[in-house]
Image (spheres, rainbow, N blue to C red):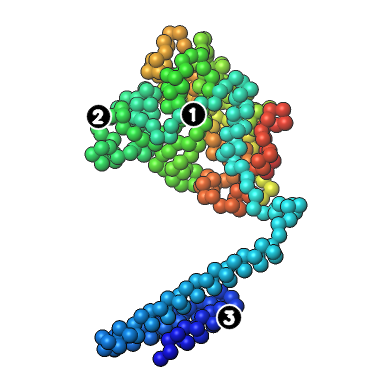
Amino acid sequence: MDYEKLGQEAIAQIGAASDLDALEALRVALLGKQGSVSALLKTLGGLTPDERKETGPKIHSLRESVTGALANRKEALEAAQMEARLASETVDLSLPAPESPRGSVHPVSQVMDELAEIFADLGFAVATGPEIEDDWHNFTALNMPESHPARAMHDTFYFPADGGEMNPPAGGNATRMLLRTHTSPVQVRTMLAQGAPLRIIAPGRVYRSDSDATHTPMFHQVEGLVIDRDIHLGHLKWTLETFLKAFFERDDIVLRLRPSYFPFTEPSVEVDVGFALETGPDGKARRVLGGSGDAPGHAWMELLGSGMVNRRVIEFAGLDPDQWQGFAFGVGVDRLAMLKYGMDDLRAFFDGDVRWLRHYGFSAFDQPTLSAGVGARL
Ligand code: PHE
């Protein structure tokens, strides 16, 4: 058989392949499992050693030249294809950006920006702390010693101890790591780091093992803390009233303070806010804040927890409670967003559904400012 001629024919065919698809078809026909060159290679097995010595090198060099020709042709065709694309494709930089794939600011971020703006005007700085917290900062320093019953209410996510078990040891362990269950540990961290006086808010993520329409395992809180001399409950009430009026952009916000209990505040106050049910544009009833909860058609709704910082917490944080007092509060950011902007299912906040984000998200240009208004338009 004239292997050289076979090779020349194959190479001519390869050179004539006009596109990458035709070239691939040729490659399969020549070198594929059922290909003609592959078939020749298989005949080697049936030859005598002498015949093989004579024919083997010819078949192998045939295969090599075919392989080389295929690679060269492929490179040439790809280069030509790229040339054609570069010649035909253009970018018109003067076209307006397309309307649909537009990012938006998540309501949680928007509300956190609004809070920072409102509290900055009252002289508060923004503080942060770690989401992976230790037992001491999350509980003990907040006057919840080991085996304090309030710990059980927090449905804490603990990290496995060195031994691998997930539940906290019976005696407690100050260095045991957990996902913080509230933003209150930032109170302790900030007092330890900065001393007094102090005015901060601490927004951030918190975690509890709980999940239904109004609870998600991760949610957002903002903590407020003021430490100074001669601070009393009146300062707390004024601050909350001023904040809520600015946030909801209404002067008729009415608060009701109720005695309550938190281990880290004494006295503790639960704060309720008056609201009325109104029919929204979608025909659904929604809560609109404003007015006394005792007025006709109105009711009270629990909004946040607060109180005077317990002197034991001030001691744990390295300050002298005879010199320094203060108040603290904690409020759900997601909850604030739902009340202000009218969402009714908390879980949707964390679904990442672009349709929801497109509807409830905010323009990045709609920065909250006190001069232009802290509320954004949906
Ligand atoms: N940390 C409390 C909670 O998560 C809220 C709170 C903060 C109450 C500060 C009082 C003072 O429920």
What's under tag 3, amino acid-wise? Ala
Q: Quadrant of the C terminus?
A: top right
Query: Label 2's element?
Result: loop
Question: Residue extending furthest top?
Answer: 323
Question: Closer to the observer: label 3 or label 1?
Answer: 3
Find disc 3 in the rendering and name its residue: 16
| Residue at position x 60%, y 78% in the image | 18
What's under tag 2, amino acid-wise? Gly
- Front residue of 86 and 278: 86
Q: Quadrant of residue 243?
A: top right
Q: Residues within 10 Å of mark 2 (few under 14, many from 20)?
A: few
Q: Position of residue 113 (x, y in %)?
A: 60, 33
- Front residue of 233 and 27: 27
Classify residue 295 as left or right of residue 150: right
What's under tag 1, amino acid-wise? Thr
Classify residue 181 as left or right of residue 50: right
State the mark number for residue 99: none
Q: Position of residue 57 (x, y in %)?
A: 36, 80
| Residue at position x 52%, y 31% in the image | 203
Disc 1/disc 2 C-alpha distance (Å): 29 Å
Find disc 2 in the rendering and name its residue: 171
Nearer the N terminus, badge 1 or badge 2? 1
Query: Label 1's element?
Result: loop
Disc 3/disc 1 C-alpha distance (Å): 69 Å
Classify residue 317 as left or right of residue 370: left
Query: Label 3's element?
Result: helix
Find disc 1 in the rendering and name its residue: 128
Question: Closer to the observer: label 1 or label 2?
Answer: 1
| Residue at position x 62%, y 65% in the image | 82
